[in-house]
Amino acid sequence: MSTLNTHFTPIDQSSWERRDYFYYFTQMAPTGFSLTANLDVTATRAWTKTHHRKFNATYLYLVSRILTQHPEMRIGRVDDQLVTFDVIHPSYTIIHADHTMANLWTAYDDNFDTFYHRYLADLANYGQVPGPMPKTPLATNLYPIGSLPWLHFTNYTPLPFTPLKTFFPVFQAGQFAFDDQGRCQLPLSVTIHHAVADGYHVSMLFHDLQAAFNRPDQLLTA
């Protein structure tokens, strides 16, 4: 059975550098925002083909790994206490044969091979189970991440019908697009609550994600 890391560190709001911004963007002007950028995934896509690995699992792993470097993206609540989780685990979409979708989640692990085999096991155990949530969530530190492989979009913005209550980022990837040199672009949308992150933080996240997709040999090979 997968070991699920749910460890967290409480945030002392009296000394938290983001205290005033958190209050402003939750109480005075509740706000979230979304940014979409094209990432060059040429190197990672080639690596997955060479090593016979699924790109989606690799995408989930690399995003989850980079999130461990960005504490502002791992802020949640535990019993009304703001906390920073050590890791957050990907809760991702899959598509059934009848085109309905479901959410699965896989416990993140620093080691790619460990995560990859957990991902394959989750697909085998739950991938054909009907309904939107075939695998029961066992922790609060799951973040939403999906893909729309049928469309190369320039913008994707989730529209919640209730006020935002979560501070984890929401990721959505689109269809690959290829330029004249054969390089592969992946549109990636990140939506975040403004209480925990500004445009600077999301920009730095994109920079780190691009660096990760540029060097799969270093991050994916045990």
Image (tube, rainbow, N blue to C red):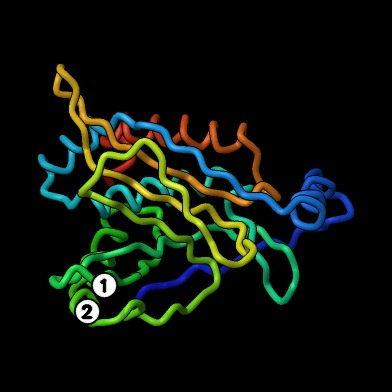
Q: Helix, strand or loop at disc 1?
A: helix
Question: Left of 25 or right of it: where is 148?
Answer: left
Q: Amino acid at mark 1?
A: Asp
Q: Helix, strand or loop at disc 2?
A: helix
Residue 179 vertical position relative to residue 32 in the rendered view, above or below: above
Q: Which residue is mark 2?
A: 125
Looking at the image, which residue is at 62% across and 49% down?
32
Answer with the quarter of the image where residue 81 lies: bottom right
Q: Are marks 1 and 2 in contact (CB under 8 Å)?
A: yes
Residue 40 in the image: state x and y as whole percent: 30, 29
Looking at the image, which residue is at 22% across and 38% down?
176
Looking at the image, which residue is at 62% across and 61% down?
164
Q: Amino acid at mark 2?
A: Asn
Question: Left of 30 or right of it: where is 138?
Answer: left
Q: Residues within 10 Å of mark 2 (few under 14, many from 20)?
A: few
Residue 100 in the image: state x and y as whole percent: 24, 71
Q: Which residue is mark 1?
A: 122
Residue 110 vertical position relative to residue 33 in the rendered view, above or below: below
Residue 117 vertical position relative to residue 214 in the rendered view, above or below: below
How many badges with numbers are in the image? 2
